[in-house]
């Protein structure tokens, strides 16, 4: 513990983590309390759109670059250190300590009176998780500077948009049976975000808090399971906890990854932190801050729900980039060398304001105006490989600001009535942006939509050109949809409000109808993806050890691909054919609802597709399992015919589904040629 020294009144305050969940809420409250606030950020543009951004001083800098810190520290009385890692990089601990050391030493040289830090609650004498331990070691590193540190330790923070609250909210809302591993029954002491902010600000006027470790929590001590059931009761939901004996934090994080918008990389440290009880063990907070009365968990949930319903979410967990990663700067759209650029332009009979308003409403519940199923599928595929997926939605249904998460994009630029730039955060072999621009033209506007892609290596180029047949119609119809929606908005400005009310009622009814349909389609998509991978499992079982102890001994042509390419190619092909079958099922289902013959055609096509899957698995059984190369040639000829026939049937029902079979046809053709060649080279054996 650092011995506190007499302080002069604190007026000038530095805040780091200003684009994060807590930091973004702390700044306006500091301003309202009369403090002069300076924010240290890596990218000042990410503060655009914040209602308080013009009331603070902004300094560009990076805690991992000591040379950038003196300008931020000059004239500062107290500094908030609100930075920590939540990823799973092997070097996160060393990076966090290096950042804290740079910050503390710079604060000491500048004569800063106090550092305030928000860490994690947990008994340091127990076996804490790596991330929770790192949070506490970070505070120790700050103390090494000699500057008095006020360290607050909190457990789960409950507030609209916080990662912990969103995890509880989505798990409870989406799953009627709450799978409950051992960590769900660990006792925790959640705290409302408004109480956290109150403590952080009150400490500035409480000299006795300097040099202290202060554990803070809400009124209630609950298990995580009790938190979920209490949330369910507040929402009028009936939920049942189902204990499971074996479900490790790693597996639990994957479950959270699929059910909620929280990716496994963030869910894992949150869950790991619950391996021990995280409760307040002393009354220091009450003695130092007697005027702060912690809310109960239910009161915190009620406040958060009111904010969500009123669409008044100040900040969200998605606002922050991974912290303490300044050596991995956000990419900006400045270097265009080596980029693939695809631009579309439309004349719009509407003013720039209406066009921009339409652009800014994309994503979330509004969707993407064309091929919404394709965007959904892309999100599912991204989630399958550990990406952010499509569930993050958006902070506000109508307004965007720099730094906002928007489905699997991040808002990089938002110039009112002029331009919106989105940077892709899904997993891609390169870097990608989607930009929308509008400018006045006569009585209307010129609208430009540009996709930028900077491929990484050969795989990046293959990725772009293989998907271009899908990107083309998707982006074209997106541009057309934006044009139509903006023109409709402009036309409706002259329509009586009664019509608008009727349209709102119709939209509301449509939303209520589509929710269960969307759930059914998600289940169908999961089953469609599952079916071809069952085929893969059967083929893999038949292959067994044949590749290592038999196939390697065969004579093969020089152009025989490396063994690793086969599972990679098949994973892609099985995924694509699964999506294609789902599209056909979806088209047939729509036809059934409308009494069209499409339903019977789709059923026939899907039966043919199922037969083809049997022959797909059978080839591996014959070639690798039975080691009959000649028989495999005959079998693959039948398989190839079935693939082409299935593609033709799919194309008739849903053209894009048929076109998705083209890579499969090409690969099967190549496999047939390879099969024949290997048979000919090994006939004498």
Image: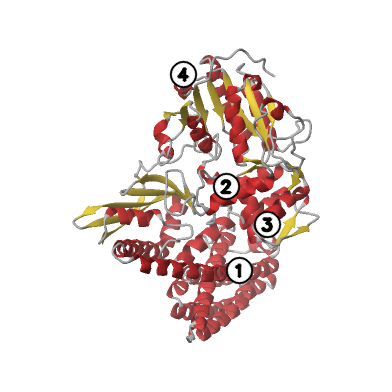
Name the disc covering residue 232, or none: 3
Dot 3 or dot 2, earlier in sequence: 2
Q: Nearer the viewer, mark 4 or mark 3?
A: 3
State which mark lies toward you, 1 or 4. 4
- Farthest residue to the top: give it: 6
Q: Reading the chain from its start, which is encountered first: label 1 or label 2?
A: 2
Q: Residue at x 31, y 56 (%)?
A: 354
Measured as percent of width and height from the top left, residue 152 is found at 65, 30
Question: Quadrant location of the N terminus?
Answer: top right
Mark 4 or mark 3, earlier in chain: 4
Checking the image for residue 523, the label placed there is: 1
Q: CA distance from mark 2 to mark 4?
A: 34 Å
**How much space separates mark 3 and mark 1, taking CA atoms?**
23 Å
Q: Nearer the viewer, mark 1 or mark 2?
A: 2
Query: Image quadrant for the C terminus?
Result: bottom right
Q: Quadrant of residue 469?
A: bottom left
Earlier in the chain: of badge 3 and badge 1, it is 3
Q: CA distance from mark 1 to mark 2?
A: 28 Å
In the foreground, 534 or 672: 534
Residue 673 picture location, percent across and down: 51, 71
Quarter assignment of residue 194: top right
SS for callout 3: helix
Res 160 label: 2
Question: Alpha carbon of mark 3 to alpha carbon of mark 2: how far?
Answer: 16 Å
Pointer 3: residues within 10 angstroms few (<14), some, or many (20+)? some
Mark 2 residue crowding within 10 angstroms, few (<14) / some (14–19) / many (20+): many
**Disc with the residue nearer the chain's start (1 vs 4):** 4
Residue carrying label 4: 74
């Amino acid at each position: 513990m650092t011995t506190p020294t007499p302080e002069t009144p604190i007026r000038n305050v530095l805040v780091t983590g200003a684009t994060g969940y807590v930091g973004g809420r702390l700044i306006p409250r500091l301003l309202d309390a009369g403090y002069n606030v300076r924010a240290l950020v890596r990218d000042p543009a990410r503060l655009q759109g914040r209602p308080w951004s013009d009331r603070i001083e902004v300094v560009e800098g990076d805690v991992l670059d000591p040379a950038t810190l003196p300008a931020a520290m000059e004239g500062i009385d107290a500094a908030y250190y609100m930075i920590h890692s939540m990823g799973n990089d092997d070097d996160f601990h060393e990076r966090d300590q290096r950042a804290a050391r740079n910050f503390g030493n710079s604060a000491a040289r500048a004569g800063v009176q106090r550092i305030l830090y928000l860490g994690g609650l947990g008994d340091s004498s127990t076996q804490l998780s790596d991330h929770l331990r790192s949070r506490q070691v970070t505070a120790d590193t700050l103390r090494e500077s000699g500057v008095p540190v006020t360290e607050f330790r909190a457990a789960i923070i409950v507030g609209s948009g916080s990662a912990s609250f969103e995890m509880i909210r989505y798990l409870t809302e989406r799953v009627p049976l709450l799978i409950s591993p051992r960590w769900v029954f660990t006792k925790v002491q959640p705290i409302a975000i408004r109480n956290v902010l109150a403590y952080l600000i009150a400490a500035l006027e409480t000299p006795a808090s300097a040099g202290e470790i202060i554990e803070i929590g809400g009124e209630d001590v609950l298990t995580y399971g009790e938190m979920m059931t209490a949330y369910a009761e507040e929402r009028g939901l009936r939920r049942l906890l189902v204990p499971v004996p074996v479900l490790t934090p790693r597996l639990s994080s994957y479950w959270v990854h699929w059910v909620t918008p929280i990716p496994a990389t963030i869910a894992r440290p949150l869950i790991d932190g619950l391996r021990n009880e995280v409760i307040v063990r002393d009354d220091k907070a009450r003695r130092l801050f007697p005027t702060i009365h912690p809310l109960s968990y239910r009161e915190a949930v009620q406040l958060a729900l009111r904010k969500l319903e009123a669409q008044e979410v100040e900040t969200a967990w998605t606002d922050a980039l991974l912290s303490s990663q300044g050596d991995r700067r956000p990419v900006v759209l400045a270097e265009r060398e080596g980029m693939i650029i695809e631009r579309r332009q439309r004349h719009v009979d509407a003013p720039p304001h209406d066009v921009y308003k339409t652009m800014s409403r994309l994503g979330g519940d509004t969707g993407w105006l064309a091929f919404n199923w394709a965007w959904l599928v892309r999100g599912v595929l991204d989630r399958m490989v550990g990406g952010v997926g499509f569930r993050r939605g958006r902070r506000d249904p109508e307004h965007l600001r720099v730094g906002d998460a928007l489905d699997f994009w991040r808002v990089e630029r938002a110039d009112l009535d002029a331009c919106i730039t989105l940077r892709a955060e899904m997993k891609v072999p390169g870097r990608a942006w989607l930009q929308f621009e509008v400018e006045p033209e006569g009585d209307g506007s010129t609208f430009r939509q540009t996709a930028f892609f900077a491929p990484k290596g050969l795989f990046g180029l293959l990725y772009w050109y293989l998907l271009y047949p899908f990107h083309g119609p998707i982006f074209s119809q997106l541009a057309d949809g934006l044009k139509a929606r903006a023109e409709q908005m402009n036309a409706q400005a002259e329509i009586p409000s009664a019509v608008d009310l009727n349209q709102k009622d119709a939209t509301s009814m449509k939303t209520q109808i589509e929710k269960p349909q969307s759930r059914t389609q998600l289940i169908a998509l999961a089953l469609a993806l599952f079916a071809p991978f069952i085929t893969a499992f059967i083929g893999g079982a038949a292959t067994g050890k044949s590749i290592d102890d038999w196939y390697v001994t065969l004579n093969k042509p020089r152009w025989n691909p490396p063994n690793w390419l086969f599972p990679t190619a098949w994973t892609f092909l099985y995924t694509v054919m699964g999506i294609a079958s789902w599209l056909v099922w979806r088209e047939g289902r729509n036809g059934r609802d409308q009494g069209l013959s499409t339903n019977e055609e789709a059923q026939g096509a899907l039966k043919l597709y199922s037969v083809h899957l049997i022959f797909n698995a059978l080839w591996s059984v014959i070639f690798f399992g039975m080691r009959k190369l000649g028989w495999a040639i005959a079998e693959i000829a039948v398989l190839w015919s079935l693939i082409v026939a299935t593609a033709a049937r799919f194309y008739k029902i849903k053209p894009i589904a048929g076109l998705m079979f083209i890579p499969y046809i090409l690969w099967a053709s190549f496999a047939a040629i390879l099969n024949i060649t290997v048979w000919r080279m090994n006939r004498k054996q």
